[in-house]
Image: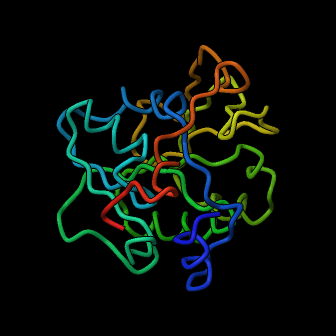
Amino acid sequence: MSKKMSNWLGTSKFNEKDEYYTPKILVEPILKYIKPNSTVWCPFDTKNSEFVILLKEAGHKVIYSHIWYGQDFFDYEPKEDYDYIISNPPFTRKLEVLERLYKLNKPFAMILGLPILNYQEIGNFFLDKDLQLLIVDKKVSFDGNTASFNNSYFCYKVLPKDILFEHLEHNNSRKNYVASRMHNDLKGDDKEC
C-alpha cells in the first residue's frame, strides 16, 4: 500500500476493500445511454479513472472528485451544474450513497453488486423508488482474478427502459485482464493529489 493511501486511511472512514477501480470494459456499456455533450459528475474518481477518460473521449464534460482531494461525496457537490452522476461507489457505504443520490435527484448510474438486491435493507429502500438496471452478462474482474459476483449499473432516469442486458466480450480476468488506469494514482502519478 502506498504512503498516500495509508495516510488517507488514517483520516477517513475509508474501508480498504471499498477502493476497487473500474476497468474499461465495465465502463463502456453505460456510455451509449448518456445524452450527447452532457456534463457528468464522477464523485469517486480521479483524472485517471476509466469513467473520466472514456466519458471525455465520448465528448462529455466531466467533473471528477474523490475523497483523496478532500471532496467527500457525503458533504461535497460541484458548484457547476451537471446532468448525470456516474461512478463506482464504496461498497460498504452503498445504502448511504443511494440515499444521497436520490436526495440529489439527478440521473445516476452506479456500479453495484447485483447480490445487494437480496439485502433486506436495500429491498426496503427501493420499495418507493424508481430503479433501472443495466445488467452485464459477465462477472467482471477488477483485479484479474475471477469475480465472485456480477457488478452492474443501478440507475435512475438514465435508461430507456427499466431493465436492460448488455453483452461483454470477456470478463477482464486472466489473459484478458486490463487494469484501470486509476491504479496509477496509488503510485503517485496523479499530481493533483
| In this picture, residue 92 sits left or right of residue 12 | right
Q: Residue furthest top?
A: 169
For residue 19, above or below residue 193: above
Question: What's the residue at 54%, 66% (across, down)?
Answer: 97
Above or below residue 127? Residue 115 is above
Q: Residue at x 37, y 72 (%)?
A: 69
Please say if 75 is above or below 138: below
Q: Quadrant of residue 139?
A: top right
- Quarter of the rendering occupied by the N terminus: bottom right
- Residue at 56 percent across and 48 percent down: it is 21
Quadrant the C terminus occupies: bottom left
Q: List x then y, in percent, for residue 125.
A: 65, 64
Q: Residue 48 or 6: which is nearer the viewer?
A: 6
Instruction: Give the answer, above or below, for where 140 lies relative to 96.
Output: above
Count of numbered badges drawn on the protein: 0
**Residue 106: percent from the left, percent from the top?**
34, 57
Q: Nearer the viewer, residue 190 or 170?
A: 190
Q: Which residue lies most toward the bottom here?
A: 11
Q: 103 or 96, which is in the foreground?
A: 96
Q: Specify how the rendered protein is coloured.
A: rainbow
Residue at left offset 45%, top offset 28%:
28
Residue 98 on image: x %, y %: 55, 63
